[in-house]
Amino acid sequence: MSEANINIVIGGGAGQGLATVGQLMSKAVIRAGYHLLVRQDYMSRIRGGHNTFSLRMGPDPVESPCEPINILVALNEETVALHRDELMDGGIIIADRKIDTGIANTLKVPYDELASKPLYYNVVALGVLGSTVCNDIGIIEELLAQTFAKKGSAIIEANLEVLRASYEWVKQQDFDFSCIAPPPEDAGSNLMMNGNEGIAMGALAAGCNFVTFYPMTPSTSVATTLINKGRRLGLKYEQVEDEIAAMNMALGASYAGARPIVTTSGGGFALMAEAVSLAGVSETPIVTVVVQRPGPATGMATRTEQGDLGFVLHAGHGEFPRAIFAPGTVEECFYLTHHAFGLAEQFQTPIFILSDQFLADSYRNVERFDVDSLPEIAGPLLKPEDSSYRRYELTDDGVSPRLVPGFSETLVRADSHEHAQSGVITEDPANRVCQNNKRLSKGNGLWEEVIGPDYYGEKGAEVVLMCWGSSLGACLEAADKVNGKSVGVLHFKQVYPLREEQFMDVLEQAGEVIAVEGNATAQFAKLVALETGFQVSGSVLRFDGRPLTPEYVLRGLESII
Amino acid sequence: MVSIEQYGDFETSWCPGCGNFSLLKGLKQALAGLDLAPHQVMVSSGIGQAAKAPHYMNCHMFNGLHGRSLPVAQGMKMANPEMTVLCESGDGCLYGEGGNHFLAAIRRNLDITLLAHNNQIYGLTKGQGSPTTTRGQVTKTQPDGVESDPFNPVAVAVAMKAGFVARAFSGEPDHLTEMIQAGIRHKGFALIDIMQPCVSFNKVNTFAWYKEHSYLIENHDTSDWHAALALADEFPERIPLGIFYEADKPLREDGDVLAVHEYAKDDLKAVLDSFA
Ligand SMILES: Cc1ncc(C[n+]2csc(CCOP(=O)(O)OP(=O)(O)O)c2C)c(N)n1
Ligand code: SF4
C-alpha cells in the first residue's frame, strides 16, 4: 500500500447525518476516480450514541479497513475522545471550533458562520473535507445538485452556497496536511455500491422477480435495494408477518414459476430453517441471503461476525444438498449471487449467500459489471415434454424436469412428505431410498460446479492465511506487511461443498496454515478438517463485533508465527 | 363443461365416517360446478388429516408444512394471479401453528380461498385439543379439560373485516358446495370455516351434535358488520351456517405472471447506472 492512500473517519451521533456526509463524500471520491473502501460502525439506536463512517481512499487499490487515521472528522466531542489516539503522525482533526480537541493540528470549523442553520452542517462538513483532500469542487457541486434535484433550484442553490463557502474557508486556514496523490488516469466510470446492493443487483441480473422478507439488520438493505431498483424490472415484493412466512411464501411463488430470493440475518434464518428443509424435499429452487451479525440470539444487532457458517451449513432437518457462497468483495456479491440463482434453478435445492454486516455496509468502487457476458439461467419448463410427466422422475443426475403449473393440462404435484415420482405421498421403503438417493445425487452436480478458492502468493509460502468471505481484504493486506516471511492467502468464496483437489496442494505445501475468521471457534477451519482431515496450525479470530483489519491480523500473527 | 369425475377418485387414509369425505366431495363439486378444470386450480395445504385432501383429487398441489399453507398459497397467487388458488387444512394447522399467517392473510387480501376443515380436535396426532376445542372438553392431553377459551375464527375474520366470511358443515353438502363456490367467486380473501366431525377423536362434537347445534342463517344482511359479529358470537353454543359477512375491499393489483415475465437488459443496465 502506498502512503498515497488515506483513512478518513467521520464520527458522531446517530441522527447527525454522518452517513449522508459519508455517502456523498464516497461518491465524490469514486467519481474523481479514486479507489475506496468504507467501513460503517454504528450502534443500534436512532439518535445519539457513537457511530463512525470510515473511508479509506486513494489512487491505489484498497483491500480492507485499517486502524490508523489520517483525518478525523468529529461531529461531536465523544468522537474526539474515542479516536484521538488512533491519529497517525501528521493526522488532523476536523471539528466544530467549540470542541477542544487537545490536538494542535485541528481545523476548527465555524459551523455556525458557514451555515445559517444546523440543517446545512452536513454540507459544511462535506465542503471542508472535500477541500482538505483537494477533491474537485465541481464533482461535489454536481453531486449535491443531483441529491437535491427533486427539491427545486432554490434548495440546490442554498446548499451549493454553503458548500462553496466551506470549501473556500479551508484554503484560508493554516494547517499541516497535503493533498492526496491524483487518481489513476484510467479511472472514472466506477460504480459506488456496498455488499448488500451488490447482492441485490446480482439477483436482479439473474432474473430474480420476487422477494419476501421480514426486516432484520443488517440484511434489510438487500430487500430495500431490490424493491427500489427492481420494481421497474417487474419484481414483486412483500414484507411479510415473519420469517417463516417469508420462506414459505417464496417457495409457493417458486413452485408457481417465480424466481425468488429471501433475505435475513441469523435470528430470522433460525425461523426459516423449517422451510429450508421443505425446499430440500420439495425440490423447490430458493436463494437465501443470510447477512451475519453476532449471536447468539439477538447478539449485537449492528455489528459484524462470521459466526453462522455452522448454522447455515446444517439448517433444515433431514438430508438434502445445498451450496453456500461467501463473497469477499462487492464484485463477488454480484457475481456469486447471479451464480447462486443459476444453481438453484439447475439443481432445485436451497442455495445460500452468507455475508456479514461489514461487507453489507461497505461501499466500494466497483468496475461496471459485464452483464452481457453473464451466463443465461435456464428457467423451468412451461410445457411438459410428454404426457408421462412426473415431478419427481428418477433421473441419472437426480434432477427432475421442473414444470410450472398452469401452462398446460399436466398437473404438478409437490410434497413435503416423502413421495413417489408422481408427487403422491407414500411410505414405501424402496421408494424412500430411491427418492432420497435422487435428491442427494444432485449434490454430485453441485460438486462439479464448485468454485475453488483463490490463492494469492507464491506456492509453498512459509505461512498461508486461510480465510473466507469478507475477511479477504484484511488478510491480503496483512500478508503484504509481514516482514521476513513469505505469506500467502487462500480465500474461499464458496464454503460448501468443498473440493479437496482445488486447494489441498496449497495447504500441504505451506509451512504453516493459519485460519483467519470472524468468529470464536474457527468454524471454517473445522469444516475443512471434517471434509479433508487437514488441521490448521493456528488461528487468528475476531469476535468482538468489529471487522478484521490488517493490524488486528498482524497482531494475532505476532504470537503464532 | 367440467365434470366432477375429472377430479378423480382416490383411495384415502381417512377413517370411515370422517367428515373429510363429504368435504372433499363438496369441493370437487364446487370446482366442477364453476367450470374450473383441474389444471386451473392450485391447492396449497399444510399437515394433518384435512391437509391430505389435495392428494385425493386431481389438481396442482403443494402439500407443504404444518401451519404454513397460507404463506405458500399467497406466494402462488402472487406469482400467477391467473390461477384459482385454494388453501386447505385443519383447525390446528390453520389457527394454531399458522395463527399469525391467518391474521396476515386476512389483512393482505389476496384473491385466495381458505377452506378450514374444523373438527375442533387434532386428528392426525390422535386427539389432542385444538385451538377450537370447547373449554372444558376432556382430551388425551387435557385430562382435566381444556383450560383455554376456544378460538373463534369466524368472529376474528369478521372483526378484521375479511372480505368474505362463511361457515359450512360437511353434513350439509349442498350448502357446503354453495359456500365454497361463493368463496371462490369472491374477489379477495375468503374464509370458509367448515365444521367436520372427527369420528375417531372428537366424541363431543359429533355429526349428531353438529346437526343439533347448527342452523342455516336466514334473513341476515351480509353487509351488516355488527350483525355479522353478533352472529359469529353465537359459537360455540350455536353454530350458524352461511355467509356472515361480505364486502368489497381493495384487492392487490394482479400484475404479471412471473414465470413468463422477462425484463429488458437495457432496463437492468439503466438500474446499474444509477449507482454511478
Ligand atoms: C411443525 C410440526 N409440528 C407438529 C406436527 C405434528 N402434527 C401433524 S398434524 C397435527 C395436528 C393436526 O390437526 P389439525 O390441523 O386440526 O388437522 P386434522 O388432522 O384434525 O385434520 C400436528 C400437531 C407437524 N407435522 N409439524
Ligand atoms: S382421525 Fe378424525 S379427522 Fe382424521 S380421518 Fe379419522 S375421523 Fe377424520
Image (cartoon, helix red, strand yellow):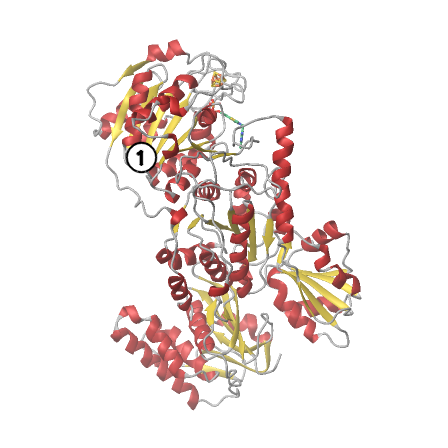
Q: Which residue is mark 1?
A: B160
- Is residue B116 visible in the rendered image? The answer is yes
Give above or below for B142 relative to A186: above
Quadrant of the snapshot with the C terminus of chain A: bottom right
Q: Residue A380: x percent and y percent? A: 47, 46
Q: Residue A532: x percent and y percent? A: 75, 52
Q: Is residue B65 left or right of residue B7?
A: right
- Which quadrant of the view contains residue B183? top left
Circle 1 SS class = loop
Q: Is residue A212 left or right of residue A39?
A: left
Give above or below for A137 relative to A144: below
Q: Is residue A141 left or right of residue A543?
A: left
Using the image, name the chain to which the residue with label 1 belongs. B
The crowd level at tag 1 (other Cα within 10 Å; few <14, some 14-19, many 20+) is few
Give above or below for A158 relative to A397: below
Q: Is mark 1 within 8 Å of ligand 1?
A: no
Which of these two is toward me, A348 or A168?
Answer: A348
Q: Residue A264: x percent and y percent? A: 50, 50
Which of these two is toward me, A560 or A450?
Answer: A450
Q: Is residue B251 left or right of residue B76?
A: left
Which of these two is toward me, A519 or A104?
Answer: A519
Give the residue displayed 78% in from the left and 60% down from the top.
A537
Amino acid, disc 1: Met
Quadrant of the snapshot with the N terminus of chain A: bottom right
- Is residue A522 visible in the rendered image? The answer is no
The tally of labels here is 1
Which of these two is toward me, B118 or B161?
Answer: B118
